[in-house]
Image (tube, helix red, strand yellow):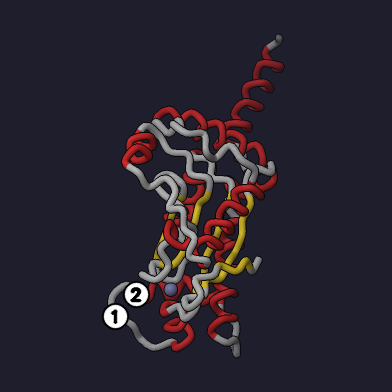
Amino acid sequence: MNTTQQNLSISRRNLLKFGAGVAGTAALTAGLGTKVNLFKAQPAVAQNNITPDEALNQLLEGNRRFIDNKRKSPNQTMTRVQEVAQGQAPFAAILSCADSRVPAEIIFDQGFGDLFVVRNAGNVATSEEIGSLEFGTLVLGAKVLMVIGHQNCGAVKATIAGNAVPGQISSILDAIKPAIKPNQTLEESIISNVKFVISRLQASPVISQLVKEGKLKIVGSYYNLETGMIKVVT
Ligand SMILES: [Zn+2]
């Protein structure tokens, strides 16, 4: 290899290492792949070795058991606690509201090590949430990422009302504001917020690459506080 070829080869390598777009995503994925060992995230139970469709079904079947009062309460024994202490491999990642009436493991009838859950008022996706969900999907291997909006969400309601709020509550409302269109009902606004949050997640090169490779499915849903039912909305 002559000097010119060597230089070309080096600059190609640099391009792969620091480049944007697909090359950048590939480099980032490779880098985070190494971190799997650093984070000791090797699964004790390969429970997320399923397809995105199977993962979604697993969530919806769990919700059906919950509604029908036929909960199996899987993976809630001390044996399971000790098993997943060695490593986690959650099959689903969830972004939902911090509302006390929407506890993910209960409404989906799951247990320890099953769900990677991010919750905040209004289920918004700012940098920290997106980073957390990138970790839950790319590094831990969750196969479905579900964003859950819920009936009568106070955060969305306050955003529509537009009144002054104390402290840093306004940062939540500011995050929801771009999702809301004029003259929408509360339910429509809650679903708009779910769709807006999904567009924010799809803008993550890490998450969109997983979707492109068929390793991840992103789903939006609406939770009915009265019936306990999760309805897929997008
Ligand atoms: Zn809420």
How dense is the environment of label 2, judged by Cα within 10 Å: few (below 14), some, or many (20 and up)? few
Residue at the location (29% across, 80% down)? 166
Q: Which mark is residue 37?
A: none
Q: Is residue 219 above or below residue 115?
A: below
Choose between 76 and 56: the one closer to the eye. Answer: 76
Residue at the location (70% across, 17% down)? 4
* Residue 55 falls left or right of residue 80: right
Choose between 176 and 27: the one closer to the eye. Answer: 176
For the residue labelled by badge 1, is the local secondary structure a helix, a strand or a loop? loop
Can you give x and y, in whole percent of width and height, for residue 167 in the image? 28, 75
Q: Farthest residue in the top direction? A: 1
Q: Which mark is residue 166?
A: 1
Q: Is residue 89 above or below residue 153?
A: above
Residue type of the residue flagged with mark 1: Pro
Can you give x and y, in whole percent of width and height, for residue 133 in the image? 49, 51
For the residue labelled by badge 2, is the local secondary structure a helix, a strand or a loop? helix
Dots 2, 1 in contact, CB < 8 A: yes
Name the quadrant where ligand 1 sits: bottom left
Mark 2, residue position: 169
Can you give x and y, in whole percent of width and height, for residue 220 in the image? 59, 64
Q: Name which quarter of the figure residue 138 lies in.
A: top right
Can you give x and y, in whole percent of width and height, for residue 26 in the image? 62, 35
Residue at the location (42% across, 60% down)? 106
Residue type of the residue flagged with mark 2: Ile
How dense is the environment of label 1, judged by Cα within 10 Å: few (below 14), some, or many (20 and up)? few
- Specify the quadrant that holds the N terminus: top right
